[in-house]
Amino acid sequence: MTAEKSDINERIGNATTVMLGAPSMTSGTDEACVDMLTQAAPGDASVLWVSFTTPAGACLDRWRSVHGTDPRDFGVIIVGETVGGGGNADIDSQAVQTISNASDLTGIGIKVGEFISGRDERIAVCFDSLTALLQYVDLETAYEFLHALTGQLHSVGAVSHFHIDPNAHEQRTIDTLLSLFDAEVRLREDGTADVRTRNLVG
């Protein structure tokens, strides 16, 4: 069974790494996130969240609120001092990994690699967020890490999107990071989306 593609996914086309730009408190951000994670039937996908800001249970609740069922497999990597609790209490503790030092990019990469390796099913990844990442490391360090990470994800055929608050950064920073991605989705305050694919970016 194949999931019907949404408008955003149709417009993204074959892009597998996407920058999702949404100012804080923009309506529809959670829905767009789950939408972009749903590249297969909801029960067939393996989904990984890398979260600097959202408790593990809340990540899974975001998915359940749209689909009413869990993905085939899921994992959550909590980075930094994200407040525990929140979200669904029945989340499998084995699915949750923690990186206490938010600047430990090597540790994040290792945990992502452990989740995505050896899988045959479609893998979808949410990285939330680049804005949070840039609070802990400089742009050059972040760029090098993301270059390696997106390559790692591409090598296993994963689809991924990376949240960013475009209002929190200079355009030069956005443009530098955008060069790593196949497409950009920019949410407006009303929840509608502008989509640019790689041949239009830059």
Image (spheres, rainbow, N blue to C red):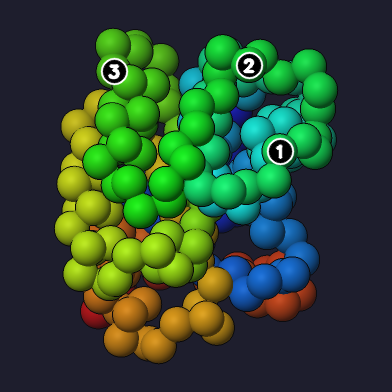
Task: Mark 2 and mark 1 in contact? Answer it, CB < 8 Å.
Answer: no
Residue 90 percent location from the top left of the image: 78, 16
Instruction: Specify the quadrant of the image occupied by residue 74.
Output: top right
The label on residue 93 is 2
Q: Residue at x 68, y 59 (%)?
A: 29
For the residues labelled 3 and 1, the Cα–Cα distance comes to 27 Å
Q: Is residue 76 visible?
A: yes
Q: Which residue is mark 3?
A: 117
Instruction: Looking at the picture, tell me which residue is in the foreground, 96 or 181.
Output: 96
Q: Earlier in the sequence, mark 3 or mark 1?
A: 1
Q: Secondary structure at mark 3?
A: loop
Residue 79 percent location from the top left of the image: 49, 44
Q: Which residue is mark 1?
A: 84
Instruction: Looking at the picture, tell me which residue is in the foreground, 138 or 8.
Output: 138
Instruction: Looking at the picture, tell me which residue is in the foreground, 75 or 121.
Output: 75
Near mark 3 (Cα within 10 A), the count class, few <14, some 14-19 or many ≥20, is few
Task: Mark 2 and mark 3 in contact? Answer it, CB < 8 Å.
Answer: no
